[in-house]
Amino acid sequence: MSRYIVITPARDEEAFLPTCKKYDYVLRLDADISFEPDFSDLPLTEFASDPRLGIAGPTRYQPKGAEWREIRQPEFHTRGAAKMYSSRCYASIGGLDADIGWDTLDEARAMMIGPSAPVLINCRRRR
């Protein structure tokens, strides 16, 4: 069973580094999102299938009339509202910045790690 800790945006997210090392994954969530009860199963399944994976997050949807519409984003970017990190990746990027653009900086740092750079993935619910 994988263990993960949930963190929310903070002024000094580096303060979470020592605590996060005790877990397999770090899940960062914004307070203004909603999701299904099995939400964390999506990225955990992706991590289990690819040990190189460092950052994963859900594909986001927004209501449009009676339907839900996917919010388009580049394939190489995982939106900041909900991101899960392997603890290895989280530690290697030094935690998260509290400034604007943090959700691009974390990915850039992860990609600069080198040949073992984590793969970024957007998880889609498979129906």
Image (cartoon, grey):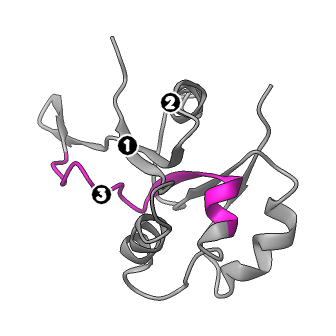
Residue 51 lies left or right of residue 7; in this view the side is: left
Q: Amino acid at mark 3?
A: His
Q: Is residue 74 left or right of residue 2?
A: left
| Residue to which mark 3 is pinned | 77
Q: Which residues are drawn in magenta?
A: 71-91
Q: Residue 95: image x %, image y %?
A: 64, 74
Whether residue 8 is situated above or below residue 46 in the rendered picture:
below
Quarter of the figure with residue 96: bottom right
State yes or no: residue 76 in magenta.
yes
- Residue drawn at x 80%, y 38% as measured from the top left: 3
Report how far apart the C-alphas of labels 2 and 3 lie in the structure.
Answer: 16 Å
Residue 10's place in the image compared with 99, above or below, is: above
Amino acid tagged 1: Ile
Q: Which residue corresponds to mark 2?
A: 46
Instruction: Establish if 82 lies above or below 91.
Output: above
Mark 2 or mark 3: which comes first in sequence?
Answer: 2
Tag 1 or tag 3, which sits nearer the N-term? 3
Find residue 60 and name its label: none
Label 3 SS: loop
Q: Which residue is mark 1?
A: 121
Q: Are marks 2 and 3 in contact (CB under 8 Å)?
A: no
Residues at badges 2 and 1 in contact (C-beta under 8 Å)? yes
Mark 2–mark 1 distance (CA, rounded to whole Å): 8 Å
Dot 2 alpha-carbon crowd within 10 angstroms: few under 14, some 14 to 19, many 20 or more? some
Q: Are marks 3 and 1 in contact (CB under 8 Å)?
A: no
Looking at the image, which is closer to me, 24 or 42? 24
Q: Position of residue 1 (x, y in %)?
A: 80, 25
Q: Residues within 10 Å of mark 3 (few under 14, many from 20)?
A: some
Look at label 2 and name its amino acid.
Glu
